[in-house]
Image (cartoon, rainbow, N blue to C red):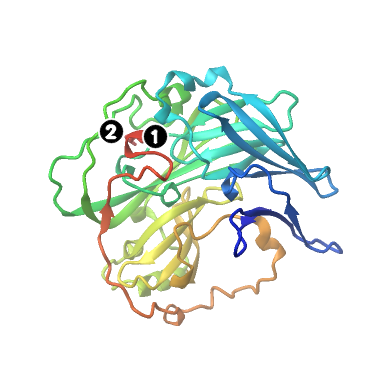
């Protein structure tokens, strides 16, 4: 597992690779020598294991100046303990140079393994740059993600609504759309995104996702809205395929809670007025795909009536059921509070340690905040693009 950190009094981040112990082998932590200072985020770095002797490679991809047709690949080898650099061209079939630069992929939000020595740098707003980093003559390809769902124009962080994962050569993509009702009337009617062909389509081909060369941008509005529910869609595709296929979709009012203990826990978190729709008591975000290759999605929820209580849920969106629940306190709530990882199988966790928790045992915030409506602000340009760079797709 590769990660970055910053020590007190230091400006630059340090990179480390942790290897879990197995059998008689002890766990180890290896410091990686500093390379290009432009890489100061853990999201820029991907790791590839090589052989059975603990060797590995780290890779980072950087645009070459403003030239979208060429990248610089930085590659670290654990065998030599050194970084190397090489120029890598963009596959001409990607057609990026013919569209406006606002549709170019920006800084990655995460890096994923696609099989073998193939890595993907994921811009959750736009798409995935993929490259076989150990090839003799590597090239970069670009896979566009499906367009934003209609209600997702004004989100600042894509982690709150989107995730991408790959397992067995199949890339999966999930998006969550929140149902919001206005608490303050807008000054004008909202401007809808451009309607694309295949509105309710179950297949989205790559050419369906190509942006126009020019597009008029809507004027930003400021709305105040309250959260009332959500819906999700999962798509998948082969790494070398040419289309996204809709796997399943579900909304909050379709989710069943077959385990009586889970139902009791969710009911206690609300005011008792939701009936069977116990998920209505929760403001839910941060959908994260399971690394098991199934259609299980992990989500983080805050109790609407008590922002000091939070719930981690595992939902099977194919079956539309709650698979697991865990409570956690407000001190662990961050913008993106969790990441999928296989490290847990090496940890000694007592069975049932979470299931025995009771709702009333969960610590509350010292000063319980009053639930506030969600502020739909104009888009920020420091988080991977402006409002004008994102378009909504009708689902």
Count of numbered labels shown in the rendering: 2
Q: Earlier in the sequence, mark 1 or mark 2?
A: 1
Answer whether labels 1 and 2 touch (C-beta < 8 Å): yes
In this orientation, does residue 240 appear?
A: no
Residue 53 is situated, as x and y percent measured from the top left of the image, at 85, 48
Residue 394 placement, left or right of 163: left
Q: CA distance from mark 1 to mark 2?
A: 10 Å
**Mark 1, secondary structure of its residue:** loop
Residue 21, horizontal then vertical, whole percent: 79, 62
Residue at 72% x, 63% y is 346
Q: Which mark is residue 279?
A: none
* Residue placed under numbered mark 1 in the picture: 147
Identify the residue at image location x=43%, y=77%: 359
Relative vertical location of residue 173 with respect to residue 288 in this rendering, above or below: above
Place of residue 38 in the rendered image (x, y in percent of width and height, measured from the top left): 58, 42
- Residue 130 lies left or right of residue 26; in this view the side is left
Nearest the eye: 207 or 386: 386
Residue 193 image label: 2
Mark 2: few/some/many CA within 10 Å (<14, 14-19, 20+): some
Say which quarter of the image contains residue 19: bottom right
Does the image show residue 354?
yes
Which secondary structure lies at badge 2?
A: loop
């Amino acid at each position: 597992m590769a990660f970055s950190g910053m020590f007190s009094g230091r400006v630059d981040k340090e990179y480390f690779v942790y290897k879990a112990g197995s059998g008689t082998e002890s766990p180890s932590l290896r410091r990686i020598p500093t390379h290009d200072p432009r890489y100061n985020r853990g999201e820029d770095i991907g790791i590839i294991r090589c052989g059975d002797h603990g060797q590995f490679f780290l890779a980072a991809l950087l645009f070459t100046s403003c030239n979208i047709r060429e990248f610089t690949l930085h590659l670290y080898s654990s065998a030599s303990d050194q970084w190397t650099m090489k120029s890598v061209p963009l596959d001409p079939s990607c057609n990026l140079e013919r569209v406006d630069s606002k549709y170019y992929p920006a800084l990655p939000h995460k890096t994923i393994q696609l099989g073998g020595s193939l890595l993907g740098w994921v811009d959750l707003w736009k798409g995935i740059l993929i490259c076989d980093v150990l090839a003799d003559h590597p090239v970069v390809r670009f896979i566009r993600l499906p367009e934003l769902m209609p209600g997702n124009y004004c989100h600042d962080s894509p982690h709150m609504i989107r995730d991408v994962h790959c397992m067995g050569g199949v890339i999966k993509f999930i998006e969550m759309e929140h149902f919001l009702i206005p608490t303050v009337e807008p000054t004008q009617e909202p401007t809808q995104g451009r309607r694309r062909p295949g509105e309710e389509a179950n297949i989205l081909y790559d050419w369906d996702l190509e942006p126009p060369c020019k597009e008029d941008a809507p004027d930003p509005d400021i709305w105040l809205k309250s959260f009332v529910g959500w819906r999700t869609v999962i798509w998948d595709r082969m790494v070398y395929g040419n289309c996204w296929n809709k796997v399943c979709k579900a909304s909050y009012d379709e989710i069943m809670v077959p385990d009586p203990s889970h139902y009791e826990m969710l009911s206690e978190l609300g005011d008792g007025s939701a009936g069977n729709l116990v998920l209505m008591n929760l403001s839910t975000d941060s959908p994260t795909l399971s690394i098991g290759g199934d259609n299980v999605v992990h989500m983080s929820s805050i109790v609407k009536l008590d922002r000091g209580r939070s719930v981690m849920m595992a939902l099977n969106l194919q079956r539309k059921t709650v698979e697991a629940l865990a409570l956690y306190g407000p001190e662990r709530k961050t913008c993106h509070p969790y990441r999928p990882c296989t490290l847990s199988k090496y940890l000694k966790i007592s069975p049932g340690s979470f299931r025995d928790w009771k709702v009333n045992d969960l610590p509350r915030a010292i000063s319980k905040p009053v639930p506030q409506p969600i502020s739909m602000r104009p888009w920020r340009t420091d988080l991977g693009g402006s409002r004008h760079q994102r378009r909504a797709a009708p689902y």
